[in-house]
Image (cartoon, rainbow, N blue to C red):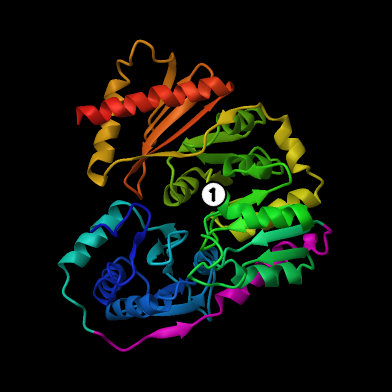
Amino acid sequence: MSIYREYDIRGIYEKELNEASVVRIGRALADKIDGEYVAVGYDARSHSPILFEYLTQGLNAGGKTVLDMGLVPTPVNYFTNYQEWDGITPSASVMITGSHNPSEYNGFKITIDKLPFFSDDIYALGRECEAMDMPQITERKVIKIDAVSRYIDFIVNAFQHLKGMDTRIVYDCGNGVAGVVTEDIFNRLELHAKGLYVEPDGTFPNHHPDPSVEHNLEDVKALLEKEGDIAFAYDGDADRIAVLTHKNNIKGDMMALLYSMKMEKPTVIGEVKCSQVMYDELTRRGAKAIMYKTGHSNLKVKMKETGADLACEVSGHIFFKNRYFGYDDAIYATLRMLELIKEGIDLDAELEKLPKVFSTEEIKVETTEEEKFKLMDTIKELLKNPPVDFPTIKDIITVDGVRINFEKGWGLVRASNTTPVLVTRFESTDAAEAKHYEKVINELILKAKESL
């Protein structure tokens, strides 16, 4: 059951994701889908095509026909849900990807009726798979579709106004699947773009494809220094982006502020880890700012519920409903950032205008799957009567973990939905205060651990 996660299914190839488990997943999933057609694509990992075959067997056994899009970025997989293929509209899509995890991992991101299949639905699917006999293999029903060409055409047509812009672009695909589409898009738009590690290679020979880790950006930063005006980097399946200027590594919440500049009074959703500067600045501009749970699935559902124009995670998931479909797409986000530059926005100058705050990166506190949610309950109890030396609490937001607002900033503690850790982050207008918030909240976590 450990492979069934909050947002997706994820595990180690052969050990956890093998013929027995994946055929069952396909068969159980077939019962959740009303229509006949399921679009399936996969990332660059060497075992992704093998898992495609296992999943297809299960879906076929459940009466579904698979639309095979082959090797694609995750956003291309999502894109197929909004397209018609020779009169066929998929009722669901599955992306076979380990995202930014090590090469031995793989997994499934599932969309049904254009919405993420996640949380309790995934856990229930897992229980069904555990209780299921091995399905009988039936006739193979697979139709090939060219989702990549359709997606590239769409993006190129949507951004014709960028054609020939003189900004020098450098980018790093990290040997993930972004390279399947980036070169064609940049070439057709006649952009000055130079790519690193564009060739998909699921062993990730150059660096780990996680652009939220500073070490993984060293090569593209060096190229930016020598040959670029702006740099982009992508995770393994191209649904997360890093944006780098000569002065800034622009995090997802600050990207949202920049993107929203060209939207008329937008509704913008951020996760609980986003800077207070983002929420305050959006409100000051007349936008509607909503704080919500971390996780791409949570944010997509909340966007549909609220009709939001834009959503973001600090890690670089950016979701555009404004002029797009409302899912996280790092390639699309790249072109929207270039559009801002084309329209004369100086990214660094805009960031310089914002109030100065001191923020930590995500700090992870190791625990266990069994204890992490118990710890959160204990921390909430302890905050009802905090220690005498605890900073003055203005209010506590409990939409996802606890975000404690203090006089000069905030501290966050939340249980990760994907790993056995508590995630913390701290921010203040004063560097010493940010460190103080970190210290007192770590002491609170320690106290909670001792009481279990």
Q: Is residue 332 magenta?
A: no
Identify the residue shown where x is 34% and y is 75%. Answer: 55
Give the left or right position of residue 442, taking residue 170 as reference. Answer: left
**What type is the residue that disc 1 sits on?**
Ser
Query: How many marks overall?
Result: 1
Identify the residue shown where x is 50% and y is 47%. Answer: 303
The image position of residue 240, as x and y in percent, is 55, 55
Q: Who is closer to the viewer here, 43 or 271?
A: 43
Q: Who is closer to the viewer here, 421 or 317?
A: 421
Give the left or right position of residue 27, taking residue 56 as reference. Answer: left
Q: Is residue 163 magenta?
A: yes
Examine the image and state in which quarter residue 423 appears: top left
**Element type at mark 1:** loop
Is any part of residue 228 visible from this angle?
A: no
- Residue matched to label 1: 212
Looking at the image, is 149 positioned above or below residue 383? below
The image position of residue 250, as x and y in percent, is 64, 43
Question: Can you say which quadrant of the picture contains the N terminus?
Answer: bottom left
Task: Provide the residue span drawn in magenta.
Answer: 137-166
Identify the residue shown where x is 84% and y is 59%. Answer: 166
Q: Who is closer to the viewer here, 264 or 24?
A: 24
Q: Who is closer to the viewer here, 332 or 428?
A: 428
